Amino acid sequence: MPTINFHEQIMTEVDLLQKRGINSRKFILKDNKIIVDVKSLRKNDKYEVKLDQLGFDIHYRSDNTIPGKLFFCVCITLIIALTILYIFTTQVNQGTLIFNYIIWGTIASIAYFKQHQDDIYLTGGQTTLVFYRDIPQEKNVLEFIEKIKTNTRIYLKEKYTNFDNIFSEHDFYNRINWLKDMEIINSSEYAEYKSNFEINRLL
């Protein structure tokens, strides 16, 4: 992996807008932070997260939608069955039919329109970001997450490889060892920073 120049590679502002019904999640990625704006029927949240508070791990979480789909099918089947009985027999009167239409139709509508969880989490740091998995498409969401991870690596590299005379040798090695463990710098970059540090100490 070649050495990354922070000033050349840092990307301009990028945003991702996700809308799901009346709920929305907006993410604005800047060079050192990400602005999050989450709106729902219950509350609105807008906050900033510094990139050094984010991790690099991706976690998927979704509801099991099969029970809900089965329940929806059962409700529709009951409505159809009652309609057939009303048309071809005298076992169901009009009042009973309308009552069941309201009850089972309402339950079927709730089961159909209920928003199930289907999210991607960016975890591993102090703060976790939550994205809708497939809005607008999963590919777009994963691409945006990769941009966050790229900006974060560049930001951390710039932040923790700026050394001056106030840093001790212990501080220096703690920092570059952490960067290497986090795979923000590779072995060749590690050796380069170490060599430069030793040379500067002799000057």
Image (cartoon, rainbow, N blue to C red):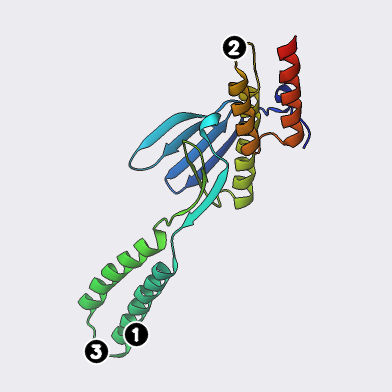
Q: Position of residue 162 (x, y in %)?
A: 65, 18
- In the image, residue 98 sits, relative to residue 51, either above or below, namely below
Q: Which residue does the image show at 69% across and 34% down from the upper left?
A: 185
Report whether residue 203 is seen. yes
Q: Tag 1's secondary structure?
A: helix
The N terminus, quarter of image: top right
Q: If you read the primary sequence from the N terminus, does the residue marked by circle 2 or circle 3 appear first?
A: 3
Label 3: how many Cα within 10 Å (few below 14, some 14–19, many 20+): few
Percent x, y for residue 103? 26, 69
- Which residue lies under the disc numbered 2? 166
Considering only vertical position in the picture, is 114 above or below 2? below
Asked if residue 163 lies left or right of residue 86, the reply is: right
Q: Which mark is residue 84?
A: 1
User: How many angstroms separate mark 3 from mark 1 (CA)?
Assistant: 10 Å
Please name the amino acid that badge 3 sits on.
Thr
Residue 119 is left or right of residue 194, and the answer is left
Place residue 38 in its image quadrant: top left
Q: Residue furthest right?
A: 2
Quadrant in the picture for the C terminus:
top right
Q: What residue do we see at 49% from left, 45% from top?
A: 19
Q: Label 2, secondary structure: give it.
A: loop
In the rendered image, residue 89, in percent from the top left (x then y), is placed at 28, 90
Of 172 and 78, nearer the camera is: 172
Type of the residue with mark 1? Ile
Instruction: Return the residue at label 3.
Output: 90
Q: Nearer the viewer, residue 89 or 28?
A: 28
- Residue 119 image label: none
Instruction: Please report whichever mark, 1 or 2, sits nearer to the chain's N-terminal start.
Output: 1
Q: Secondary structure at mark 3?
A: loop
The vertical placement of 137 against 150, above or below, is below
In the displayed structure, would residue 119 be above or below residue 4? Answer: below
